[in-house]
Image (tube, helix red, strand yellow):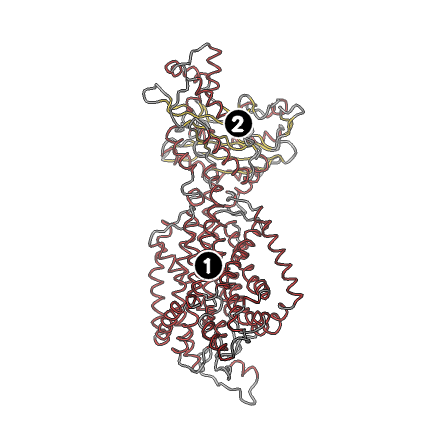
Amino acid sequence: MAWCQTDCIEKPLCAAFRKLGTCVGQNPWWFLLVPLVVSGGIGAGFCFFAENESNNIEDQFTPTNGPAKSEREFIKEHFPTNDSGFFSRQRLYTEGAFASFIAVSKDSNILTKAAFEEIILIDKKVKDFHFYDNGTVYNYSNLCAKAGATCFSNALLDLLNYDPNLVENTNISYPIANRSFIANIVGGVQLDEIGTVIKKAKALRLRYQLREDDEKNKRLSLLWIEKFLSEFPRDLAHSTHIEVSHFTSVSRQEEFEKNSKRIIPLFSVTYLLSISFSIISCMRLDCVRNKVWVAALGVISAGLAVLTGFGFLLYCGISFAINTANAPFLILGIGVDDMFIMLANWQKTKVHDKVEDRLAKTYAEAAVSITITTLTNVLAFYIGVMTPFPSVQSFCVYTGTTILFCFIYNITFFGAVLALNGRREASNKHWLTFRKVEEDHKPGESKLYALCCVGGTYNQESGAESEHKVYFFFKKYYGPFLTNRWTKVIVALLYVGYLTGSIYGCLHIKEGIDLRNLAFDDSYVIKFYDDESDFFSEYGPRVMVTVTESVEYWDSTIQDEIETCMGCLENSTHVDRELSESWLRMYIDRAEKMSLDIRENKTFIGNLSKLFNFVSTFQQDIELSEDKMSIRASRFFIQIVNVSDSFDQKNMLIELRNLARECRIPLLVYHPAFIYFDQFLVILTTTVQNITVATAVMLIISLLLIPNPVCSLWVTFAIASVLVGVAGFMAFWGVNLDSISMINLVICIGFSVDFTAHISYAFVSNDKTSANERAIDALYTLGYPILQGALSTIIGIAVLSVAGSYIFRTFFKIMFLVIFFGAVHGIMFMPVILTLYQSCGNQNLGSSNIHDSKERSESRNAHSYQHVHHCKINGADSCELTERY
């Protein structure tokens, strides 16, 4: 199939890299120093880090075009808040500026005199927090949001008149007490036999709402919140009956921004581990052939790529999200993997050839291999830019671009390192002292002297450096064991179990990011979130139902339509119909009791003042036209219940929006929390879209660069299998499908190609007549490189496993699953599966009944020689097949 050959791509690429290798070998100092200068210059882009750092949680972790954002703009325009005298928390279109604490009883009931004495004492201290600004003293009383002439207060404390002596003798109804909704104030409630009066309660929440009606008040409110955060924990030491957790409107953002500062120390640990692993992997007992400096500088090459890539994008003004701090750990692993490929190919060259010739051959083989690796990984990342989450876009752009720089530094800086090291080896100089040593061990010399001061040995038959012993482990032990009949049965059963468990996990994976996970584990906000979840999850947000256009409210037909729409919403399983609030219902009811005629426009509008006299806050729910002759927009409220997890939140949001859309009256439903709930609507579809596109791209690349369609199909199968495994085991490991984990699933595609494509190709292009022999030979060639590549990447991200942040631990978990399952597919599942299909072999090579040996040889050379060395895990080792052919 001539149309399936890829010489048109491979041959020019090999020729170009061969010329580059010769050039680098002849001028190593230029290719060593110029990248250092360039990285230093472009790396200065980190000076712009502060202005490009973008850690706003809403901007980065919610969909760019989420419906709730446009709904918020409508509410903001038509129903602006008033903090100076008509404050109502349920009418805020944002969370507002606030401080809050939750008191949890150490006993079974917080509604006791002793507990309330401590709560009221803390409440008094909070209200006494003060600071000076331009000589003026500010405290809560002159910064609080006001309802009427007084500060917005706690309905339960108002009911008890702030008197601890009354708490044990007062019957408190639930969830409405004294015409106020208290379910968001009292938590962990146990009701009496009738089910209306609180018998016991476990927690009490107090909230201190602040003014934001102008820039000055916003600034002063933030200063008071800072005072609250610095002083509040000190007042808890003597609480004997309660445990207290606290939170503010800025807590989530401030704690989130600490992530980047606390993760920086892990970089040094990662580089130390990577350098150590690289040195150990490349260390030889031969004092000349030892590659210690090569390994160390290979890791530094990856570090220079990070410096250059990030600096370049910061120069360009590309925003840097906090999850992008994961990228250097991943890039380090990829860079070290590519280093192993280059180094392994170098070791296959003849030691007595000229350095430039050795490097030319290395480039012709390995550079093509890492080009394919880079291409697949970069495409996988750039496909992720299509997501509607800015945090994912930032991660993908920074990582994809830096991988390109990593590739450039590998073929320039690291190539120069290989050339200089080759000159040292050609002169038979010691790796540490750089003094010339003897090649042969002389009689009478001690073994220690021979180990330290004699070196330069190589394989006399091949003329290349000696091969690592791990290769022979795969050939003599692992390969024959894996291809044993009973082992195949066990592996097949393991794979069925793996696939079954993975599919089960996929069906139970949770969607969306939990905001508590954006803070470090030891953050004070975690305890507050836990208390909130434990004691205040029964009742959810109080949702606005807004009529977005001017309608004839005085018309009984319109009134019936509005009532029908409200009825549909209230019939939802996520809504408590007894807790709805409608100015129109109350207006109609009051008009009947007062015998008011509201059946035509003027009287309907004119008598609204009587409704406002009865309930003043209703003024904020009706927007009159400029001429006061019509109502431009109005809103009602419904109470959400039982939406404690992301699954319920998603279903609730979809159901309410669908009901509003089906209504004949133009409606929208909104709550500030919907800004974050919107992620549930796009996370799954976006992930599937990205994965589908990335898989299709990988299949096209496979078809273009691998001349066997069967191999390409097996690569696609492996991608799907690894992807299902990673997604399924995410659920078992407590990882949600969110904007953080979504991009890692796209990464999964690029890495699964790395681990499986060339095992498949090495199998189908092999000349052995037995399927088992082909599998053993493929494992012999690629088993160790797969392990090296897997270990180098895992070590690059290992320190993230102990990070105190969900963002970084999640990155480690998913990348570990990707690497582990990819490697297992490469060295266990795929070889066994391939042996079950004899037709997957190279039939042109194995049909002895049709072709004589000369024809088989010619066919083999034509079909196999050109593409075997495309091994993305270790180009040199797969190219060893070429030498044997």
Q: Viewer-nearest of labels 1 and 2?
A: 1
Q: Give the residue pinned by disc 1.
A: 699
SS label for mark 1:
helix
> Quadrant of the image for the N terminus?
bottom left
Question: Can you give x and y, in whole percent of width and height, for residue 527 in the image?
Answer: 56, 41
Question: Can you give x and y, in whole percent of width and height, for residue 474 in the image?
Answer: 58, 71
Residue 16, placed above or below residue 525? below
Marks 1,2: beta carbons within 8 A: no
Q: Give the residue pinned by disc 2.
A: 570
Q: How many C-alpha atoms fall within 10 Å of the one at disc 2: few (<14), some, or many (≥20)?
A: many
Q: In this view, does 200 lie to the left or right of 307?
A: right
The answer to whether residue 433 is visible is yes
Question: Can you give x and y, in whole percent of width and height, for residue 509 in the image?
Answer: 56, 46
**In this orientation, which residue lies closer to the viewer: 513 or 823?**
823
SS label for mark 2:
helix
Which amino acid type is marked by label 1? Answer: Leu
Q: Distance between the residues labelled 1 and 2?
A: 50 Å
Q: How many C-alpha atoms fall within 10 Å of the one at disc 1: few (<14), some, or many (≥20)?
A: many
Q: Which mark is residue 795?
A: none
Residue 39, placed above or below residue 185? below
Residue 675, placed above or below residue 14? above
Which amino acid type is marked by label 2? Answer: Glu
